[in-house]
Amino acid sequence: MAADRLYLDHAATTPMLPQAQAAMVAAMAGWANPSSPHSDGRAARAMLEDARRRIAAALGWNGHVLFTSGASEAIAIALTRAKAARIVTSPVEHDAVLRVTKEAERLVVDGDGRVLLPELAAGSLVAIQHVNNETGVIQPLADFRRAGLLLFVDCAQSAGKLALPEADMIAISAHKFGGPPGIGALLIRDLALVEPSGGQEQGYRAGTENLPAIMAMAAALEGRGDWLPVAAALRARLDAGIEAAGGQIVARDAPRLPAIASYRMPGLSARAQLIQFDLAGISVSAGSACSSGSLKTSHVLGAMGWDAAAAGEVVRVSFGPQTSVADVDRFLATWTAMAERASR
């Protein structure tokens, strides 16, 4: 990344932490297939199981940890192989959830995108994000822990930042908290909740484990400090500046992860904004990185009641541990100049 560029798209992916890079390089230097019976394979298996324990400890998780290629695969395993009478989810979930739950019941959300949970039959599996990837809104997951219900939580945006919620299954992705891309995990309380498929990971995920990436994920979780209080101050500064410049804060009054926020600039499309920000050396996005290549209208904002025109003027800004006051001020200066031109 060029030294003069400003990266404010950490919700899409965040740079690897130095300790994660070091752990990955070290593991690459001498790893073998963890399923091999010889001494090299047994040594790799010992490293793998040690990393599994370290990851569970870092997250405060006392269940099973099944390694996957990322949160999307963890979501697919949980939601296509769950032993549940029915699956219920919301219209503001990540595309990775919506793609594998096309026949599922969709719950209703309020104007801030917070899910409203009706009475549900016992045996239902409720699949809900912890933190929305577009708006940063934190879901009231304590409301979903009801007798007879199973809870699956997409924690791609919250793991490594917030404490894990109480849930039966959780998906995480390392590249969201300073680990490498292509590695994640399904955290599961009871393996009997999903159908096995054979292969590695206790028969629940086939394919040789990516040990170097797993070691890097463990190091990233252990090395990540508590930077959210700083992020909260930065976002408060950004929120105030956006409103002063005539912008609109998405879900302004809802509980939000301090590292993610979405803003509307009336009169200028998100596509035009992204081009101008990029020319100014600033990386932001419009919605999820998994769909922003097409810049389609946000299904999240649509579910929250935004019309297509207004939703089409929203961009997302997301912070990382190194984001500074100077970074926020640079973004605000660029935003303000763009908003002034758009209002003429």
Image: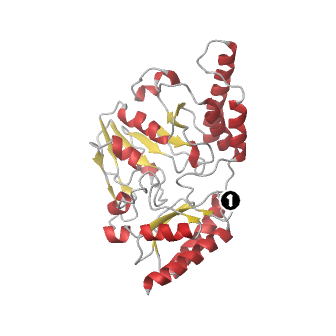
Q: Quadrant of residue 164?
A: top right
- Position above or below: 250 against 163: below
Q: Residue at coordinates 32% horizontally, 35% vertically from top-left? A: 123
Looking at the figure, which quarter contains the N terminus?
A: bottom right
In the rendered image, which residue does mark 1 sit on? 322
- Position above or below: 38 against 95: above
Q: Residue furthest bottom?
A: 344
In the image, is 159 to the left or to the right of 219? left
Q: Residue at coordinates 43% horizontally, 41% vertically from top-left? A: 152
Residue 168 visible, this angle:
no
Residue nearest the viewer, comparing 203 with 344: 344
In the image, is 123 to the left or to the right of 204? left
Residue 12 x %, y %: 52, 53
Residue nearest the viewer, comparing 269 with 315: 269
The residue under label 1 is which amino acid type? Answer: Gln
Q: Residues within 10 Å of mark 1 (few under 14, many from 20)?
A: few
Q: Quadrant of residue 101?
A: top left
In the image, is 159 to the left or to the right of 73? right
Residue nearest the viewer, comparing 287 with 29: 29
Residue 8 x %, y %: 58, 62
- Position above or below: 283 against 174: below
